[in-house]
Image (cartoon, rainbow, N blue to C red):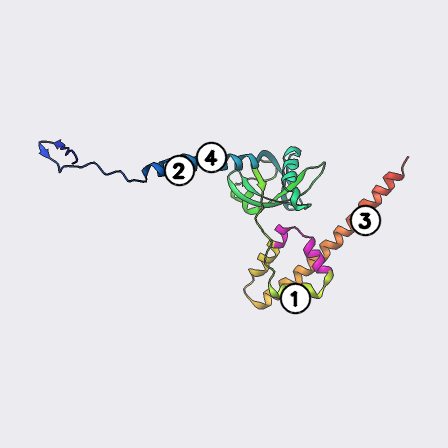
Amino acid sequence: MYKIKRRYCKGKAEKPIAPARRPAVQGRAQAGVPLLLKLMTERSRWKEKRAHSFIGRIYKTGILRCVDVPKDVSEALREQNRANHAKYVSVRGNVSGVRLLATLVPGGRGCFKMFLHSRIWKRLRIDSGDYVEIALEVDEEPREPIVPEDLAMALSEQPGVLAAYRACTVNLRREFVNWLNAAKAEKTRERRIQFGMRMLLERAQRRKRHGRRSSGSTARTGMAP
C-alpha cells in the first residue's frame, strides 16, 4: 500500500496524492541520456573543428565584392577537399551571422578568393573597405543544378558552349539555371538561353586569351638572363 500524503492550504485539505509508480525501464532510459549528450557534444566539437573563422576585408573587382581567404585557412580547406581533386572548393558558413553558400576560386600566393553575393552585403549594409567575420567549412553536399531540357538541347548543339558551361564553377552554373528558370514567358526563356550561351562563349574566349598571355609572359621570363 502507498502512504497517503495530505497537503493543507488555507485550512482546506487537498485530494490525497499517491507517489507515481516508477516504470520498469527507467534505469535503461536514464543510462542512455549521458551517452546521447556525449555524442551531441562530440558532434558539436567536430563541427567547430571543421569550421574556420577569420576576419576579412571586402574589396571590389569590377562590380563584384570579394574577400581574400587567409593562407592558413585556404590550406586547411584545400586539405579537406583533397578527395575531390577540384580546383574550386564549395564551402558553406556565415558572414557576420548571415548564412553563406559559395565557391572559392584560386587567388594569389596560394590563397583562395571568395565572392560575396549582393544579398549578403546589402543585408548587412556593408561595402568595399569594411571588415567582416567569416566562418567557412567544406560543403560536401551535392550542389550541381539540374539542367532543364531546353538548355541541355541547346548546349548539345554547340560543343564549344557546352565545354564553357562545364568550365564554370558549380555556383555559377546554379545561378545561370536559376536565372533561366525565373523566366515566366516562353519567349523570355528562349532569349535568356541564347543570351546566356553567347555570354558563356565570350567568357571562354576571354579566359583562353588570358591563358595565352600568361603562358607567353612565362616563356619570356624563362628566357631572360
**Given contact means CB atoms under 8 Å apart, are the residues at marks 2 and 1 in contact?**
no
CA distance for labels 4 and 3:
52 Å
Q: Earlier in the sequence, mark 4 or mark 2?
A: 2
Q: Which residue is mark 3?
A: 212
Residue 152 visible somewhere in the drawing: yes
Residue 15 in the figure: left or right of residue 157: left
Local secondary structure at mark 2: helix
- Image spot of residue 27 (x, y percent): 34, 36
Q: CA distance from mark 4 to mark 2?
A: 14 Å
Q: Which residue is mark 1?
A: 153
Foreground residue, 149 or 57? 149
What element does badge 1 sit on?
A: helix
Q: Which residues are magenta?
A: 160-173
Mark 4 = which residue? Answer: 41
Q: Is residue 166 magenta?
A: yes
Mark carried by residue 189: none
* Residue for point 87% across, 41% down: 220
Residue 201 is left or right of residue 217, and the answer is: left
Residue behind mark 2: 32
Query: Viewer-nearest of labels 3 and 1?
Result: 1
Magenta-colored segment: predominant secondary structure: helix
Name the kind of residue labelled 3 in the image: Arg
Q: Quadrant of the C terminus?
A: top right
Picture layout, residue 139 above or below residue 177: above
